[in-house]
Amino acid sequence: MATALCPGSFDPVTLGHLDIIERTARHFDHVIVAVIRNPQKSQSLFTLEERQEMLHEVTGHLDNVSIEFFKGLLVDFARDHGAAAIVKGLRAVSDFDYELQMAQMNQRLSGIDTFFISTSPQHSFLSSSLVREVSKYGGDVSSMVPPIVRERLVQRYEERSSS
């Protein structure tokens, strides 16, 4: 049974993330969506548990997908879960520059290969940070995130503005 990891911070999960997860699920027996806290990114909007919960909700239609979060090296997590591959979505050439270096390091450390899937054109501009920014200022992100995520974004920014 071939297992793949789709790692990311998913803060919040976008339709671009969901597209990559769904496409990965078509090619692997089991997909683990690995939710990480990225210390290089700014303060998280949602807790790890909230991100995990939203991912459970938006991937519930995929029988071969599970959601987990972890700390430490991705390759250690991959090895511990018997993953044969890491799958990453690429939006632009700038993503490739960084992701290639990570893929080579991960392969060197563990022998686990990384597969790149090009993002569908309608999602190529999406990033969680852009979605947070648009949502923070009241912009409509309904075409960028699943409905439950949009609701959570609206609620989170309403909470922050009333405190």
Image (cartoon, helix red, strand yellow):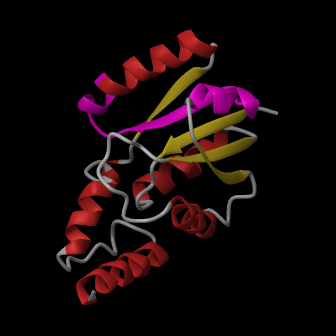
Residue 140 in the image: x percent, y percent? 25, 77
In the rendered image, the quadrant that contains the C terminus is bottom left
- Residue 72 quadrant: top right
Is 30 positioned to the left or the right of 115 in the image?
right
The residue that appears at 24% across and 30% down in the rendered structure is 94
In the rendered image, the quadrant that contains the N terminus is top right
The residue that appears at 25% across and 73% down in the rendered structure is 135
Give the farthest residue toward the bottom. Answer: 162
Is 112 positioned to the left or the right of 115 in the image?
right
Residue 138 in the image: x percent, y percent? 20, 80
Residue 71 in the image: x percent, y percent? 57, 40
Give the residues in magenta. Answer: 74-97
The residue that appears at 33% across and 85% down in the rendered structure is 159
Residue 57 in the image: x percent, y percent? 61, 70
The residue that appears at 38% across and 26% down in the rendered structure is 99
**Of 152 and 163, the residue lying toward us:** 163
Is 58 positioned to the left or the right of 81 in the image?
left
Q: Is residue 163 above or below residue 10?
A: below
Give the farthest residue toward the top. Answer: 108
Residue 18 painted magenta:
no
**Of 51 and 98, the residue lying toward us:** 51
Q: How many marks?
A: 0
Give the farthest residue toward the left. Answer: 137
Q: Is residue 68 above or below residue 104?
A: below
Residue 80 painted magenta:
yes
- Residue 154 quadrant: bottom left
Give the farthest residue toward the right. Answer: 1
Q: Is residue 3 above or below residue 51?
A: above
Q: Is residue 101 above or below residue 2?
A: above
